[in-house]
């Protein structure tokens, strides 16, 4: 059993906006208890900027992006030091992983994240993960590590994603504004009404809000991982292990896919687009073949070899995603040579079948979602920048 436990900045801060030593100790005590029940835990912790605020007595006034990044650089080692001190008192070692969103886009980096985490867990070490805010602005602007926690949950094939926050779940209306708002105990059907219940605003210290937690839960559940949003309190994980569930449960929805196809379907962001003709479309969807150069009509984007690309039909409807074996520059050159009637160097595959996932099954008469994978998280994890 593997869990990702994610905690936000506001849940770790005291009434003065500084990181609370007592809350750090309470969280670590809970994690030690959970691990004693045979559960492997990876902690995704925000709080670096809040820790930096406290060290420089910045309060909770608004800050510029460079100021936030500077505070994160100052606060991150301090935050890890608090975790290490609390953990060592209970005989547990901690390790730090600082990641960026782009680390999940490249397959080799993605695999190394998994391998490193596996080794740490096997050695009984608690991995503590945060986004590298000094080189990445994704966490500062979007999601307070909620997305990072969901990405990591898919990466390590976690069984559950527990997002600890300052509210006890998802409500049908903002509970601080609507006195009679009702908590939603269980979500097993995704529809647009879920997103109408919340706003995207975070707290004074955090940047997430319930919107980013719903997005993270949607990504996790699409990959077969159960997700929870619950209030952080001392002993909350202990009570959860004992069956006292006080949050909102998001039921796993996803199909059973291999790790590589999970990565292609839900994690890796396409860096470009390839248009294919009818023959290539049939080869990919019906004959389960690789994509070859003759079936390519045109390309768009600035992708390198081993990047992920979208593959679309002549109506620009996506039929799948794959790992391209040739860069956009080289592929464009080959297409130009072909157009001039020149001899084209033989390339076995542009996208090998092992690096392909079908996202839409298009026949001559209709189109429907494939049983292989449905990219239902489109728009939540970030699309191509092209």
Image (cartoon, rainbow, N blue to C red):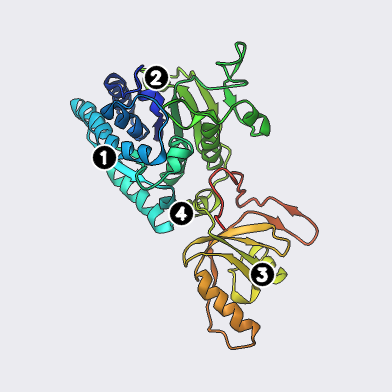
- Do the residues bearing badges 3 and 2 touch, measured as CB atoms within 8 Å? no
The reply, left or right, for residue 236 in relation to residue 262 is: left
Q: Residue at x 34, y 29 (%)?
A: 50
> Residue pushed farthest top?
179
Q: Circle 3 — which element?
A: helix
The residue carrying pointer 4 sits among few (fewer than 14), some (14 to 19) or many (20 or more) residues within 10 Å by Cα, namely some
Q: Circle 2 — which element?
A: helix
The residue pinned by badge 3 equals 280
Say which of 152 and 331 sits in front: 331
Say which of 158 and 55 sits in front: 55
**Of circles 4 and 2, which is in front?**
4
Say which of 3 and 320 sits in front: 320
Of mark 4 and mark 1, the one earlier in the sequence is 1
Of mark 2 and mark 1, the one earlier in the sequence is 1
The residue pinned by badge 2 equals 236
In this view, 162 is above or below 258: above
Q: Circle 1 — which element?
A: strand
Tell me the distance, in whole angstroms, between the alpha carbons under discs 4 and 3: 26 Å
Tell me the distance, in whole angstroms, between the alpha carbons under discs 2 and 1: 23 Å
Tell me the distance, in whole angstroms, between the alpha carbons under discs 4 and 1: 23 Å
The residue pinned by badge 4 equals 105
Tell me the distance, in whole angstroms, between the alpha carbons under discs 3 and 2: 53 Å
């Amino acid at each position: 059993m593997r869990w990702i436990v994610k905690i936000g900045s506001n849940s770790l801060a005291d009434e003065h906006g500084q990181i609370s030593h007592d809350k750090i100790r309470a969280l670590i005590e809970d994690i030690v208890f959970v691990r004693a029940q045979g559960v492997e835990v990876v902690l995704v912790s925000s709080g670096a900027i809040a820790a930096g605020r406290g060290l420089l007595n910045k309060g909770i006034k608004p800050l510029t992006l460079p100021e936030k990044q500077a505070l994160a650089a100052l606060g991150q080692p301090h935050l890890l030091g608090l975790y290490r001190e609390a953990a060592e008192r209970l005989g547990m070692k901690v390790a730090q992983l600082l990641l960026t969103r782009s680390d999940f886009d490249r397959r080799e980096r993605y695999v190394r994240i998994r391998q490193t985490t596996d080794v740490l867990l096997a050695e009984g070490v608690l991995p503590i993960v945060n986004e590298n805010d000094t080189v990445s602005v994704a966490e500062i602007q979007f999601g307070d590590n909620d997305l990072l926690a969901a990405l990591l949950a898919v990466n390590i094939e976690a069984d559950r994603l527990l997002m600890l926050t300052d509210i006890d779940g998802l409500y049908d209306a903002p509970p601080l504004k609507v006195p009679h708002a009702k908590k939603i105990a269980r979500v097993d059907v995704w529809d647009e009404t879920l997103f109408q219940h919340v706003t995207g605003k975070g707290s004074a210290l955090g940047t997430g809000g319930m919107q980013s937690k719903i997005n993270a839960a949607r990504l996790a559940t699409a990959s077969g991982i159960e997700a929870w949003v619950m209030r952080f309190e001392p002993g909350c994980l202990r009570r959860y292990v004992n069956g006292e569930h006080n949050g909102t449960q998001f039921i796993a929805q996803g199909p059973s896919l291999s790790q590589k196809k999970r990565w292609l379907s839900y994690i890796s962001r396409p860096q470009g687009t390839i248009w294919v003709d009818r023959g290539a479309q049939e080869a990919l969807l019906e004959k389960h073949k690789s994509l070859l150069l003759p079936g390519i009509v045109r390309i768009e984007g600035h992708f390198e070899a081993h990047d992920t690309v979208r593959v679309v039909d002549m109506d620009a409807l996506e039929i799948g995603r794959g790992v391209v074996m040739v860069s956009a520059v080289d592929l464009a050159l080959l297409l130009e040579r072909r157009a001039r009637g020149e001899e084209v160097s033989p390339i076995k595959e542009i996208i090998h079948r092992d690096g392909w996932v079908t996202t839409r099954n298009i026949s001559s008469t209709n189109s429907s979602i494939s049983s292989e994978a449905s990219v239902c998280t489109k728009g939540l994890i970030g699309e191509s920048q092209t």
